[in-house]
Image (cartoon, rainbow, N blue to C red):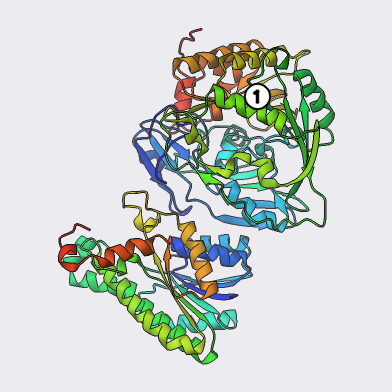
Amino acid sequence: MSQVKSWGRYPHVAPGKVETLRLLTDLPDLAQFEGSVLPYACGRSYGDSCMNEGGVSLDVSQLKNFLAFDPETGLLRCEAGLTLAEIIEVMLPRGWFLPVSPGTKYVSVGGAIANDVHGKNHHKAGTFGRHVTQFMLLRSSGEQLLCSPTENVELFRATIGGLGLTGLILWAEFRLKPVVNSYIDVEEIRFRNLAEFFELSRDSDKDFEYTVSWADNQARGKDIGRGIFIRGNHSQSRYLTSQTPKRKQLFSVPVEIPFSLLNRASITAFNTAFYYGLHYKRVARKVTSYEPFFYPLDVVGRWNRFYGKGGLLQYQCVVPYGNDTTAMTQIMGKIAAQGEGFLTVVKNFGDLKSPGMLSFPRPGTTIALDFPYHGQKTLLLLDQLDMIVREHGGAVYPAKDARMTAESFQQYFPNWQEFAKYIDPKFSSSFWRRVTTPRKIEV
Amino acid sequence: MTKLLIAGATAALAHEAAKLFARDGAELFLVARTADKLETVKGDLTVRGAKKVETYLLDLGQLDRHQAMFDEAVKSLDGLDAILIAHGTLGDQTASQQSVSLTLQELNTNFMSAVSLATIAANYFEPRKRGTIAVIGSVAGDRGRQSNYIYGTAKGGLDIFLQGLRNRLAKSNVAVVTIKPGLIDTPMTAHLKKGPLMAKPQVVGVDIHKAMQKGQSVVYTPGFWRYIMLIIRSIPEPVFKRLKL
C-alpha cells in the first residue's frame, strides 16, 4: 500500500508508522508498538475513523485469503483484508451474492464489520453485522478470541460497528445468499417532493428487496425533495447468467486535481439533466447488471480526486420517522441554500436491529451527500445540519464523519460509554479521540 | 491446462496466477518451503475453485531433490500439463558483492534451481509433444546494473537458457514462456520505495495466466516495461557505466 489516507482525504493526517500484516500465523506483538494501533485496509471510510494520527496503522490489506466455503449453507470464511469485490468475483459466478452491499465493493470484510455497513436492502436484511456468524479477534494482550452470538458475546456486539477499536479482526465468517443470476429488475420512478418519496417508500418496502433514492439537492421552494426513486429485485430469470463479464473501469482519476471540479454550476446542470433527462416517462423499467445498480461510482477509479486538494466531506445522517417531513425539509433546504452538496442519496431504513452496540442505522430516513471542503464555510454548514439532526433525535454515521463534535456524537450514541468498556487499551483512532474530547460548537 | 505444478507457490506472483487457474478449475501441485504459508495458499485456492490441490514441502535450493518432487507431482496429478517456476530471492546486493558464498547462493536459488527444474520438465514434456514451461525471470536480467547485478545475472542467464530451451522444444510443441516482471509491490520489494512505476501483483497474475494459456514466448509485465527496457538496453556501455542505476 502506498499511502494511508481516508477516502475524503480530510482531515490531512497520517500515521507515524505502517505495519503490514501478511500471515495469520505470523502476527506482531501489538503491545510492543510505541503508541496506539488501528487496523487499516482499503481506506474507504471518509473521515478519520480509519486514521490514527501519529500512531500505528495495522495494514491488513494483505490478509486476503479465502479460508472456507460451504456450498450447502452459503457460509463463507475469509481473512479480514479480503475485499467484497473479490468475494463477488469468485462467488457470484457460482450463484452466491453478498447479504448486504454497501455503495462500493472496494471495502474489506473487516471494514464492513467494523462499520457495520448497510445497503439498499436495509429494510429487508438489516446491516452487514446481522449476517456475521463469527470472527477471530486479536487483542493487544496477544489473546485470540473467537467472537459469535454465543461466545464472547459482548465483544462480538462491541466489534460490530466498533470502528476497529476493540481489537484486530483476523478472519470472519458470514452468510452469503443464493441468487439465480447477476441481474436486477429495476424500476425508476420520478417523485416531485418528499411526501411523494415517503409514499413510494411505503409502497415499495414490502415487495422490493432494494430501494434507494437520489434527490436533487439544488431544487428550491416547492421542488425541495424532488428526485428519482429506484427499486429493484434480483432477477429470477433462468435465461440470464451469473457469469457476467467484469465491468471495466471507465477511467481512473490519475492525479489530484488542484481545485474542485464540482461547483454550483456543474452540480445544478448535472442534477437538472438527471432529473428530467433520465427518461421521458415518470416510470422506467429495466434489467441491469448488478454492478451499475449497486456500485455506480466504482466505475470511476479514485473519483474522490475530483474534489480537489482540499478533499471532501461526506455527511450522512438518519432522522426517525416523524408525522411530517419537517426534519428532512429543513436539512434539504439548508443544503440547497449553500448550493454545494453533490449526489444526494435518500433511503428509509427498516427496523431490523443490528447486534452492533455502536451501529449507526436505526428506523428512520437517512440522507447522504458529499461536499467539497471549503474550510470554515463547509464545517459551519455541517454543524448547522447537526443541530437539526440532534433536535429530531437522529444520528450521524461515524464511518463518513470527519468533524462532528464530541457533544453531538455522545448524543447520537448514548451508549458510547458502555461500548468504551470493550475498547482494547492499545487501540485508538483520530475519530475516537475527537469524539471523546469536548470541543465547543460555534453556530 | 488443467494439471499444473507451481514451484514457489507461496510467492506473491505465483499465488496471483494460481488464483486464476483455480477459478478455471485446475488441479494444482504446490511446492514451497514454509508449511503455514503453503497451507494458507492451499485453502485460498480450494475455495476459489481448484479441483484438486496437493502440497509438497521443499526448499527448492536443494537441487538433488527436484526429480523426486517432480515425479511425485506427476504421480499425484496423474500427469502434468504445465509447470510454473516462480521461486526466487532478491538478496542484499551490497552484502552479496562482498561475499563469494552469498553470491553463489543467490545464483543457486535464482538460476541453477530454475535450470534444474526446467530441464526435468523439458525432458518430461518433450517426448509427449505437449506442455508448457513458464518461468518468472525479471527485467533486471536485461542489463547488468550496480544496484542488483547478482540477481540480474541469475535472471539474465536464465533468459538465455530459456531461449535455447524454447528453440529446442519448438518442434515438440512445448511452449517455453519467459515472464519478465518489472517493479511489483510484493513482500520481496517491501523494502523499496513505492514509485509510480510499481504495479500490483494482480496485474502480473493476469499476464502470467494469459501468457501460459497462449504459449507466448517473452512477456514483460506490466507491458510498458518492454519499452523501458528497450531504452535501457540501447544506452551505449561507455555512458551506461557512469549512470547510477
Disc 1 marks which amino acid? Ile
Quarter of the image that includes the C terminus of chain B? bottom left
Q: Chain of mark 1?
A: A
Residue A61 screen position, x and y as percent: 48, 47
Choose between A170 and A296: the one closer to the eye. Answer: A296
**Residue A350: quadrant of the picture:** top right
Residue B133 screen position, x and y as percent: 47, 78
What SS does tag 1 mark? strand
Q: Is residue A370 visible?
A: no
Tell me the residue that label 1 is attached to.
A367
Which residue lies most toward the bottom here?
Answer: B127
Residue A108 screen position, x and y as percent: 55, 44
Residue B188 screen position, x and y as percent: 36, 58
Quarter of the image that includes the N terminus of chain B? bottom right
Choose between A317 and B235: the one closer to the eye. Answer: B235
Q: Residue at x 43, y 34 (%)?
A: A257
Circle 1: is it few (<14), some (14-19), or many (20+) Cα within 10 Å? many
Which residue lies most toward the top here?
Answer: A443
